[in-house]
Amino acid sequence: MEQQERNRPSGWWYLLGALLAAAGVAVFVVLRISSTDPDFRLVLPGSKQIELDKGEYTLFYEHKSVFGETTFSTDATVPGIRFFVMAPDQSGIKLTVLSVNEKYKFKGREGYSVVRFTVDSPGTYTVGGGYPDRPPGAVFVFALGKSSSGSVVLAVISIVGGVGTSAVLVAVTFMMRRPGRRIRDPGPGL
């Protein structure tokens, strides 16, 4: 009986499991917020020239925002806008409409991803859009951010690793702490 109590893990292992799960979730949240904080914002209809580096970019519809001195709170459903991105040589950049929307909500801003595009070389690009079916005066805020798939992968690894490791640790601790658990005697030579 004394041998069984000595081999029984401490209840502190449950706390460690909870801390690992919390750490995994916290790292996930921090990485997701930092990767969805769009760098540039623009009011559409209209266009804006923006210096872009090579890489993948995402355009977000920001339905709650403070831009300049104006507070925006518009319908959460993206309006029927037609976007365009023009390269420095005035050629059009292919836009991909996203089937899964990445959402964010922080610093009084709330939005979600709408389209993504890739820039092959750095330069001054024109980003804009218009509303063929909206009356004049209807304006909406959009934000543009560089996509960072590396941090997305790290975010997923952190949550799966933290929560997964926590689950295994808690399950093993529970199994080893069960009343009546039999401990095999390793024998006299060990």
Image (spheres, helix red, strand yellow):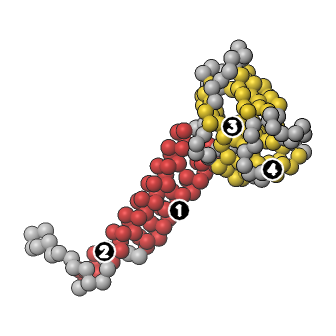
Q: CA distance from mark 4 to mark 3?
A: 17 Å
Q: CA distance from mark 3 to mark 1?
A: 31 Å
Upstream in sequence: badge 4 or badge 1? 1
Mark in the foreground, 4 or 3? 4
4 and 2 marks in contact (CB < 8 Å): no
- 88 vs 163, left or right, is right
Q: Residue at x 70, y 53 (%)?
A: 105
Question: Is the residue marked by circle 1 packed among few (<14), some (14-19), or many (20+) residues within 10 Å?
Answer: some
Q: Residue 168's spot in the image, x, y percent?
A: 37, 63
Quarter holding residue 128: top right
**What residue sits right under mark 3 in the picture?**
59
Upstream in sequence: badge 3 or badge 1? 1
Q: CA distance from mark 1 to mark 2?
A: 23 Å
Residue type at tag 3 = Leu
Q: Is residue 14 visible?
A: yes
Q: Which mark is residue 74?
A: 4
- Residue 142 versus residue 170 in the image, above or below: above
4 and 1 marks in contact (CB < 8 Å): no
Upstream in sequence: badge 4 or badge 2? 4
Mark in the foreground, 4 or 1? 4
Q: Residue 75's spot in the image, x, y percent?
A: 78, 51
Mark in the foreground, 3 or 1? 3
Q: CA distance from mark 4 to mark 2?
A: 55 Å
**What residue sits right under mark 1 in the picture?**
22
Which SS class for mark 1? helix
Q: CA distance from mark 3 to mark 2?
A: 51 Å
- Residue 125 versus residue 79 in the image, above or below: above
- Residue 118 versus residue 110 in the image, above or below: above
**What residue sits right under mark 2 in the picture?**
176
1 and 2 marks in contact (CB < 8 Å): no
**Front position in the image: 39 or 89:** 89
Of all residues, the one furthest to the front in this rendering is 133
